[in-house]
Structure formats: structure tokens, C-alpha cells
Image (spheres, helix red, strand yellow):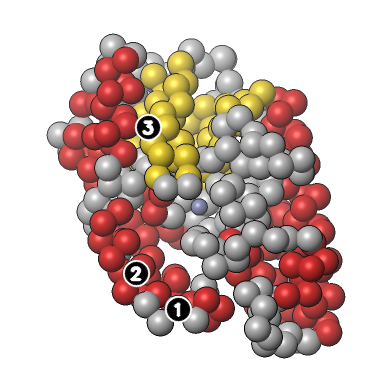
């Protein structure tokens, strides 16, 4: 059965980023992803009013993963619904909803090792305080294979797309083939011009799952990611656009993997390069973006290849 659900993108800007959320006009209305602390009041309330709707009607807050630009507004949005909306996140990213400190820990565990910023922890702590509207327990923690009922026979199925983060998921409106994937399809990345994923092998497997199994007829992205030609994708794609985005994401992952494995086999060396110790990878890929600009996808991603290489011995 094709589900009759209108889908409206809601955008809130944050610095260099356009944060996209989506309003699903189901019998129990849902919002996928929340932007940051200010996004619900400043972006969503007026956008829903334009549609003749009230934020208080929202009954589901569906988080595609735990990054701050996707869940920072969750607590504020939940408050605006009179605490009636159910807040949903994959169990592997739930700690990022429970704790601001978890975001700082993630920074210390990976990016800090490469950025060597003496103020990094203070900056991250201050940002988590400002940008995350509140710490909370999820109402529903999900895993791949779960199904949520949005009333009137409308169901949304949850598919694990781990790789970008461990708890990245797609929410799929059943029968319609509309998939909300957050940042699980990175193409060539957003503002930083480099795709970010913590676990390269899982990221690739998730893209192949999208291509071969899920085959969405509509694909909704968390940001206007850039294609191989540098042009940003629309955040709402049809089946052809979805196939192209997934194919380009797989192609660039393969190129990064090749360059990373060569550099790792040759042995990493600390240099004065801002890309150190992965300078040969940047050179081989022709990547000239600033690798230190947060959220530093260059280092997050290459650290993932390094961990896999080290684990393989
Ligand atoms: Zn993300």
C-alpha cells in the first residue's frame, strides 16, 4: 500500500552548514532530525505555521544519528510538543542524546589526536553546552528491523546504516520507498568537501545495502552534499538521484580507501602539513580543503582506515 504522507523539508542554517529536518505529515506527525538548540523555535515553528500547522501536533522526533547538528534541538522540540512527542534514536548513538560530555569524549578520542588544538576541549565543551538544548533519555531506542506506527496504517521501518556513526539509521516510510538517511550518504561531503565516516567498512556495506536491498524511490539527505562535479545535491532526491548519490559515495570511498591503504602500508609520518600524518592521502586525492575545520571529516575518516589497518595487523 502506498502511504499518503506529505513530506516537507525544514531548513535551519548554522554557520557554514544548512541543517535539514523533515516534517512528515502523518496522522501522528513526525519530524526527522532537529538541527541545533535554536532550530525548533527559530526554524520549525514558523515553517510549520506556513503550512498551517502547529509544532505542538508533532508526535514523533526521529533522529537519524547522534551528531549535534541532528539532535541538538531534540530536547527543545520535545518541550515545544508539551513533552508528548516520542524521541527515537538507535541504541548505539543513544549516549549522544543522554550526555553532552559524550560529544566531547568523541572529539578527544579521535579528532583531538590530529588537530592538536590546546583549546579544543574547552571549545567543544562550550559548543555542546550552547548547541545541545538538553540531555535526555530516548523514549524509544531502536535497532535495524524495528517498525514504528505513525497512526492510520502509516508505518516507518528502521534500517541500520552504520558507518558514519555506529547508530546511523534510515527511516523508511513503508510502501512509499521514501528513505531519510541523515548523513549516511555523504557523496563528497558537505561544507568541508570530504566525506566523514567513523567505520569505513561499515559505511561501504551500508551504501551497498541502500543500492542493492533498500533501493529507495525517494532519498532525503541531511545536508546538500556535493557531487564529484562540486555541485551540491538537492536534499530531496528521486530514484535516479538516489542511485547517483549512492554510486558517487561508493566511488569516492573506494578512491579514499586506495590512497589510505597505500599511505598506511608506506608508514605514517608526522610532518608540518596540516594533513599530517595523512598528507600523502590529501595529495593523491587532490584534497585542498582545510582539514582542521570542524567537524574535521578528513581526520575522522582517515582515522577509521588507520584503526582498521592496525586491527588487521
Ligand atoms: Zn553526522
Mark 3 or mark 2: which comes first in sequence?
A: 3
* Label 3: element kind: strand
**For the residues bearing labels 3 and 1, Cβ distance under 8 angstroms:** no
- Measured as percent of width and height from the top left, residue 34 is found at 36, 40
The residue drawn where x is 52% and y is 40% is: 222
State the quadrant of the N terminus.
Answer: top right
Inter-mark Cα distance, 1 to 2: 9 Å
State the mark number for residue 123. Answer: 2
When the figure is inspected, residue 271 is found, relative to residue 292, above or below; the finding is below
The residue drawn where x is 56% and y is 14% is: 2
**For the residues bearing labels 1 and 2, Cβ distance under 8 angstroms:** yes
The residue drawn where x is 65% and y is 83% is: 272
Ligand 1 within 8 Å of disc 3? The answer is: no
Left or right: 201 with respect to 258? left
Question: To which residue does mark 3 refer?
Answer: 31
The residue drawn where x is 62% and y is 75% is: 274
- Measured as percent of width and height from the top left, residue 195 is found at 64, 54
Question: To which residue does mark 1 refer?
Answer: 117
User: Dot 2, crowdedness within 10 Å: few (<14), some or many (≥20)?
Assistant: few
* Label 1: element kind: loop
Amino acid at each position: 500500500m502506498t502511504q499518503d504522507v506529505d513530506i516537507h523539508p525544514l531548513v535551519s542554517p548554522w554557520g557554514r552548514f544548512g541543517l535539514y529536518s523533515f516534517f512528515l505529515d502523518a496522522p501522528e506527525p513526525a519530524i526527522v532530525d532537529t538541527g541545533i538548540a535554536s532550530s525548533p523555535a527559530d526554524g520549525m515553528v514558523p515553517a510549520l505555521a506556513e503550512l498551517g500547522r502547529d509544532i505542538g501536533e508533532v508526535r514523533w522526533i526521529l533522529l537519524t544519528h547522534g551528531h549535534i547538528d541532528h539532535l541538538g534541538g531534540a530536547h527543545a522540540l520535545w518541550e515545544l510538543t508539551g513533552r508528548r512527542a516520542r524521541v527515537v534514536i538507535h541504541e548505539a548513538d543513544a549516549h549522544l542524546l543522554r550526555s553532552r560530555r559524550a560529544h566531547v569524549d568523541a572529539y578527544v578520542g579521535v579528532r583531538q589526536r590530529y588537530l592538536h588544538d590546546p583549546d579544543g576541549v574547552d571549545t567543544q565543551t562550550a559548543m555542546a553546552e550552547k548547541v545541545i538544548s538538553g540531555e535526555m533519555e530516548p523514549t524509544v531506542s531502536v535497532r535495524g528491523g524495528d517498525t514504528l506506527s505513525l497512526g492510520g496504517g502509516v508505518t516507518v521501518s528502521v534500517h541500520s546504516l552504520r558507518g558514519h556513526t555506529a547508530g546511523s539509521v534510515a527511516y523508511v516510510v513503508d510502501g512509499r520507498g521514501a528513505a531519510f538517511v541523515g548523513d549516511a550518504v555523504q557523496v563528497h561531503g558537505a561544507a568541508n568537501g570530504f566525506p566523514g565516516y567513523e567505520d569505513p567498512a561499515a559505511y561501504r556495506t551500508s551504501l551497498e545495502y541502500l543500492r542493492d536491498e533498500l533501493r529507495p524511490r525517494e532519498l532525503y539527505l541531511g545536508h546538500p552534499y556535493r557531487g564529484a562535479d562540486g555541485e551540491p545535491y538537492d536534499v530531496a532526491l528521486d530514484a535516479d538521484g538516489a542511485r547517483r548519490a549512492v554510486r558517487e559515495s561508493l566511488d569516492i570511498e573506494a578512491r579514499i580507501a586506495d590512497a589510505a591503504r597505500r599511505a598506511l602500508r608506506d608508514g605514517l609520518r608526522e610532518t608540518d602539513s596540516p594533513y599530517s600524518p595523512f598528507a600523502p592521502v590529501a595529495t593523491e586525492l587532490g584534497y585542498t580543503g582545510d582539514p582542521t575545520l570542524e567537524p574535521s571529516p578528513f581526520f575522522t575518516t582517515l582515522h577509521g582506515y588507520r584503526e582498521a589497518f592496525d586491527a588487521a595487523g
